[in-house]
Image: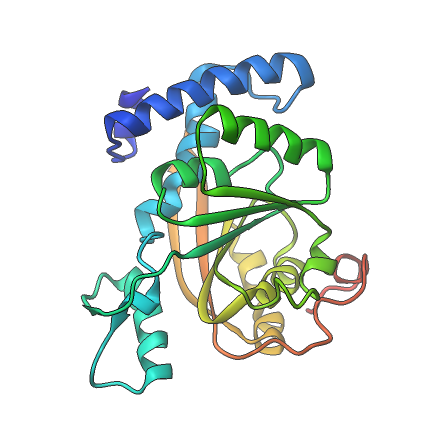
Amino acid sequence: MQSIFQKYHIELSESELEKFQKFLEIFMETNSQINLSAIRDEAWIIEKHFVDSIMLAVFYDIQQSPTQYLSPTLPSQGREQAAASSLLAGENWVRCLVEKIRVADLWTGWGFPGIPLAIVAPQAEFTLIDSVAKKLKCIDEFAEKLELDNIETLVWRAEEIGQNPEYRESFDLVTSRATAYFPTLLEYTLPLLKVWWVFAAYKLTDKEEFASMKKALIRLGGKILKIKNYEIDGQERSIVFIEKITKTHAKYPRKVGIPLQNPIV
């Protein structure tokens, strides 16, 4: 397993490798019973699920919340904005306030990228969201067996949780892996995100789809911060980092089904 991670220049601690090994065994056993994934080969599960999930941690320091990095020369709002961007740019900021970053993984499915990210970022708090209860029950069992106390699960539709005041604009980082068409995806995710913080979208590299989100970004209050490209087993993939620069209008996300049927394009 270690050699596969190293192939992608990912170095894990001994305890992290032990958790991934245990996760592999649990995932394969469960997959033989309830068909979690069409991928059955051990090496492919490691590459296409584990490695792909934690590529975000290669490009973005999940555990270092932007509120920890404050420049004394900027006003408070500007400091937070610049600090969020610095996590990608690799700039150094003065550590001032320590608090756990809150991560929402929307449409988590069977726990990707949420569970692998929770393994490599134990100081962050992860909320894994899906509308299918049996998937989240499975994730709860995985988390318990892996002794991951930084994971909670929520059964909720994307359109509805984004309108709930308890969760709207409450997360520091939102992730979603290989899910909806980009304009639709932005309408689901940006309402969950605090202003100046980041949505990380895992996508197959598709410049045409990336170009389709310009209108949605303007209307929902986001901008492209950076696109990081990489390959998994020869397949081109990207993580698109979207920074939220203004509050999202209260009418978004729209009612169930509308963002999918009538995306902002």
Residue located 55% across and 36% down the image = 111
Tell me, yes or no, if residue 212 can be seen here: no
Residue located 45% across and 23% down the image = 23
Q: Is residue 106 above or below residue 192?
A: above
Front residue (pair 57, 134): 134
Q: How many marks?
A: 0
Residue located 81% across and 57% down the image = 257
**Relative image position of residue 93 (x, y in whole percent):** 20, 69
Q: Left or right of 93: which side holds 157?
A: right
Residue located 47% across and 15% down the image = 25
Q: Left or right of 1: which side holds 35?
A: right
Q: Where is the C terminus found, in terms of image quarters?
A: bottom right
Front residue (pair 107, 98): 98
Quadrant of residue 22 in the image? top left
**Relative image position of residue 73 (x, y in whole percent):** 21, 86
Q: Is residue 182 above or below residue 25?
A: below
Tell me, yes or no, if residue 226 can be seen here: yes
Which of the colour schemes (rainbow, by chain, secondary structure, one colour) is used?
A: rainbow
**Relative image position of residue 110 (x, y in whole percent):** 60, 33
Q: Where is the N terminus found, in terms of image quarters?
A: top left
Q: Is residue 151 above or below residue 244?
A: above
Quadrant of residue 251 in the image? bottom right
**Relative image position of residue 193 (x, y in whole percent):** 53, 65
Front residue (pair 215, 114): 114
Q: Is residue 116 above or below residue 56?
A: above
